[in-house]
Image (cartoon, grey):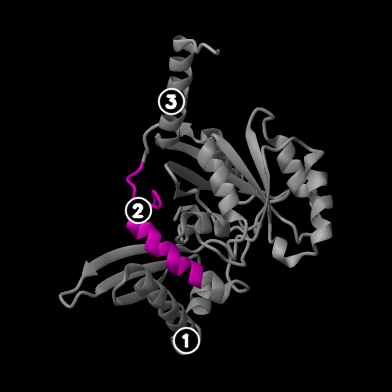
Amino acid sequence: MTILDKSTNDSTEGSVHNSADEKNLRRCGFVAVIGETNAGKSTLVNKMVGQKVSIVSRKMQTTLDRILGIALYGNSQIILLDTPGFLRENSVESLSKTTWDAFRESDDVLFVVDVCKKNFDASRKLLQKIDVAKKVSLVMNKVDLIHKPELLGISQMFSQVRNFENIFMVSALTGSGVEDSLKYLSSAMSVGEWIYPEDTITDSSFEKYVSEITREHIYHRLHQEIPYKCVVKTENYQQQSDGSVKIVQNIYVKNNAHKIIFLGRQGSKIKAIGEAARRELSTLLGKNVHLFLHVLISTRCDTWTH
């Protein structure tokens, strides 16, 4: 006959309850998304959040500020810090500072690599700079564009630089593999109340958010013709009596030559930019949008943030 020790039984039962309670507890934490320019960091953050919070463009270095995106998975609020990509030898000091500030705030790090690149030296050097005490997961992005046998060699090469918590193989564009990374981050967040309301997807102001939409379409249209620095500011946002919205934005460029490029022949380019931005804003806001764009010259725009 087996005699159960009541104290042991109570302890075991309590442990089961505690485990179940812990699964139901809310979790929250910061995750820095770091990597070279054009590795797909912004696309990954947008996919994790489920909505666009960060500008995506073929033009390098379009994320000039730290963008905070907020993803929910299960009971966890995952606060993603989409940082400016690291430039090479000519890196801008302020951009690097923004990235490292975000890195210091984070509990976990997603290190994003474009597996289609031919040379990974810059990524390896960047990876070596990260403190060994940080929890880092390798995100191998664009795996749908490369032969699968090559992926093993790339992952082994980076694993020789440091140990990773996880290695995720994803296509940020299609979303393949992204849920695996969310599942891991959800369990890795610390137990604690959420910092932001449930329906919040970014800490950017609404004015900055709609400005970023227009700036993205500028880069899509003019990515080979303009310098990195143009500033879009939303000057006016008005609800109209018919339920539509009137948005007035100023686009600041450095000189008249840049202004001519923006306008295009008989205003064709700025009209095309405005139409594309208006359509996306209408979809995002769920209402008709009347968008008015003005191109202005300011020699100070190089010093402004977005």
Q: Which residues are magenta?
A: 196-217
- Above or below for 283 versus 122: below
Q: Position of residue 97 (x, y in %)?
A: 57, 40
SS assignment at label 3: helix
Residue beneath label 2, please? 205
Q: In the image, 71: left or right of 157?
A: left
Give the residue type that dot 1 points to.
Answer: Ser
Near mark 1 (Cα within 10 A), the count class, few <14, some 14-19 or many ≥20, is few
The mark closer to the camera, 3 or 1, is 3
Helix, strand or loop for disc 1 = helix
Circle 3 is placed at which residue position? 18
The secondary structure type at the circle numbered 2 is: loop
Instruction: Answer with mark 3 or mark 2, whichever residue precedes in sequence.
Output: 3
Q: Residue at x 26, y 66 (%)?
A: 237
- When the figure is inspected, residue 195 is found, relative to residue 203, above or below; the finding is above
* Residue 206 on the magenta segment: yes
* Residue 137, horizontal then vertical, whole percent: 65, 42
- Label 1 sits on residue: 268
